[in-house]
Image: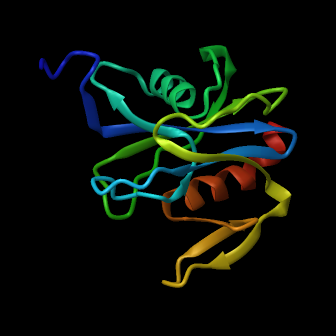
Amino acid sequence: MDPTSGGVENRNSAAVGIIYSSGEIILIKRNEREDDPWTGQIALPGGFSKFGEQPEETVLREVMEEVNMSFTGESIYAELHTNSPNKANWIKVHPFVLKTRSLEGFKAGPEVSEVRRVKLSGRIESRTENGYDSFVFQDWIVWGLTYRILKDFIEMEKEFS
């Protein structure tokens, strides 16, 4: 397959969506797969860009694929600073805030085992068993890159309300 075609992933660029409404966001639990280094983890909906795809296009496509929610470019409220996973610093992850009136209608796509809407105010600051800073939302533990992205977002949340 031609590496410039729209079907091939660019493993250096990814985008995630912070789907936000009235103090709540959408989180996903990734399916468990042997070939996925982030298997089973709690995350924001998102994924790798396809070659030639802009990060804004990636987040809109991935949100639709993972949680069945349709957004347009006008739905992108803000982009937070680009970040990378600690163990994969060559991957540039672009976090986007997708502000919406309602978080209704989400449904887990094929790469996702569960989707939840959670209240940001309901989080508990914690540490994982391995000593990583984390947030706990009910029984879901958010750590690593997703934790860092959410921490940045929470510090700026008043701007998005």
Q: Is 138 left, or right, of 56 in this rendering?
A: right
Which residue is at the front of the view, 101 or 83? 101
Q: Is 22 left, or right, of 130 in this rendering?
A: right
Q: Residue at x 49, y 50 (%)?
A: 30
Q: Is 124 left, or right, of 87 in this rendering?
A: right
| Quarter of the view holding residue 127 | bottom right
User: Which of the colour schemes (rainbow, by chain, secondary structure, one colour) is used?
Assistant: rainbow
Q: In which quarter of the image is the N terminus?
A: top left
| Quarter of the view holding residue 26 | top right
- Residue 5 versus residue 37 in the image, above or below: above
Which residue is at the front of the view, 47 or 53? 47
- Residue 94 versus residue 141 in the image, above or below: above
What x and y, as percent, mark residue 159? 80, 40
Q: Which residue is drawn at 45% across and 26% down?
A: 58
Which residue is at the front of the view, 131 or 152? 131
What x and y, as percent, mark residue 70? 64, 19
Q: Which residue is drawn at 76% across and 65% down?
A: 138
Q: Is 86 left, or right, of 3 in this rendering?
A: right
Q: Quadrant of the C terminus?
A: top right
What x and y, as percent, mark residue 11? 27, 40
| Quarter of the view holding residue 20 | top right
Extreme residue toward the left, this view = 1
Q: Residue at x 35, y 53 (%)?
A: 33
What x and y, as percent, mark residue 160? 79, 38
Q: How many marks?
A: 0
